[in-house]
Image (cartoon, rainbow, N blue to C red):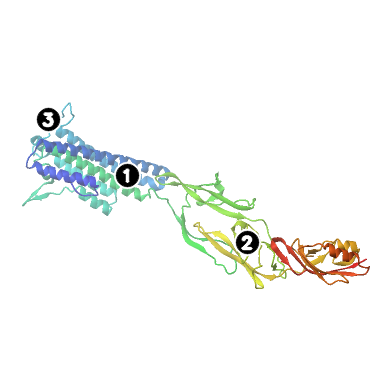
Amino acid sequence: MAGGKLSPRQKMINMMYLVLTAMLALNVSKDILKALTKLEDSLSQTITTVENKNADVYGTFNEAAKDNPDKALKWKDKAYEVKAVSDQVFAYIHDMKDSLVSVSGGYDEETGAPKALDAKSQPAAYLLAEQGPKKATDLKVKLDNFRNEIIKIADNDPAIKASLEGAFNTADEKEGDKQVSWEYATFGEYPLGAIIPFLTDIQARVRNAESEVLSHLGSKIGEGEVSFNTVKAMVMANTNYITQGGTYEADVFLAAYDDSQDPTIIINGQTLSAEKIENGKGKISFPANSVGEQTWGGKIIIKQIGKGDVEYEIPTTTYTVAPPSVVISPSKMNVLYRGVPNPIEIGVPGIDPSKIRVSGQGVSGSNGNYMADVSGISGKEINITVSVEDTKPDGTKVMRNAGSKTFRIKGLPPAVGTIYKRSEGVFSAGAIANSTIEAAFQDFAFDLDLVVTSYEIAIPGSPPERVKNSNKIPSALKAKIERLRPGSTVTIRNIKAKGPNNLQVDRVGIISVDVS
């Protein structure tokens, strides 16, 4: 009764059977017969479960042979050999049970159960008597043939052989000092109520053996696995753009594919045409019509043995389209000025501006447009470093060095003081007296509006006077200027001004004008 790969449920049932049949040697009570009937029902449920499982496996063999007959048809035929042998011995045992019930009084018309579960003589005569049909001996022969045929179909696999030889061991047994035949040890002196469950247990072992061999045959055709026949060394670089001082990184691995079967490849919802798929590999290309980050994805569909069409998602992949660009740098003019925000445009050819990171003291901004405020730097130079965000094949984000540049730091050039946009010249006394003192950076790259906040004015015949918080000439000084004779010179010096963002400008040129 033991042997083979049994489930915990089956082992429990076998143990119950051993206990109950041992108790029968002492007393065959109605309670014991009732327990044996429940055991019979449980074994029948187990058989149904295994038969349903086996039916699914035969369906898998059918699909595999349809999808790939060259690889699967042979194993499908072997599977159905197993089915034929198993069904034959299973049906034989079923007929035996019906015959045993019939010779022992038949079935109860109301309950459908055997009438005489406690009958002993009739089953013994049917199974064991010399003058009877000796069906127990016939069963032994059929079980031996079943075991041997199944092992042969499984190509004498050692694991299958060991399992079936244990499950269907029909050797004589030793009881005390004498040898007892398998037939007598199995059926001798037991009532019908014990023999029926035991025959059902043999049927369960037949179906379990069938299931075990089907699983073995299925593994021969790679059931549930993708078939590969080509292996190729591949290199997948994290990036093909490396700057000096950076590091080239790549994954090196073996890729396997089936060059005998072209898959269906769908990219961005469109099926790749047959001419773009060759030897199991697809070739894709995208026109670079739009600037910026682009994404694509899709799926690959292959016929998988035992499963039909199976889809594999292609991970969403990104790439960046950059406009044609050229970098031209005046090597002698790499200067940043203190006191003002210095605008800087930074780009890396082929890289989306959003993937660029810039580092340097006082540098801020994004997406290609940056400002450098070097007012707080006491040195004469600043180094600005650029790195780019890259994505490894596994999706990991990394930063890669794209280069750096050193800029000189200078103070602002002197501003020019003016009235009426001139720092010298001849004006009427009234024009000078009513002028606005102005300051400006001439021919300078930055458009900075300055406002004069103080100055010193020298008028002939009077000591120099300091004017604060104004860019106009006070009334008292206006009167002095208006009394000047032609040819007199008015000098405005020590001019101070302010600009945007609290910019203080102390270096402003002198204004020197003559009275007409």
* C-beta proximity under 8 Å, tags 3 and 2: no
Could you tell me the amino acid type at mark 1?
Ala
440 on left or right of 220: right
Residue drawn at (31%, 42%), measured in percent from left and top?
53
| Residue annotated with mark 1 | 79
Ranked by sequence position, the earlier of labels 3 and 2 is: 3
Which of the 4 image quadrants contains residue 79? top left
- Residue 298 position within the rendered picture, expressed as x and y whole percent measured from the top left: 52, 48
Query: How far is the residue under mark 3 from the one under mark 2?
Result: 101 Å
- Residue 360 position within the rendered picture, expressed as x and y whole percent measured from the top left: 61, 66
Could you tell me the amino acid type at mark 2?
Ser
The reply to whether residue 126 is visible in this rendering is no
Query: How far is the residue under mark 1 from the one under mark 2?
Result: 73 Å
- Answer few, some or many: residues within 10 Å of disc 2's Cα (few below 14, many 20 plus, some between 14 and 19): some
Q: Residue furthest front?
A: 476
- Residue 415 position within the rendered picture, expressed as x and y whole percent measured from the top left: 78, 67
Q: Nearer the viewer, residue 358 or 325?
A: 358
| Residue annotated with mark 3 | 105
Q: Secondary structure at mark 3?
A: loop
Could you tell me the amino acid type at mark 3?
Gly
**In this rendering, the label closer to the viewer, 3 or 1:** 3
The reply to whether residue 74 is visible in this rendering is yes
| Residue annotated with mark 2 | 364
Q: Nearer the viewer, residue 121 or 398?
A: 398
Q: Secondary structure at mark 2?
A: strand
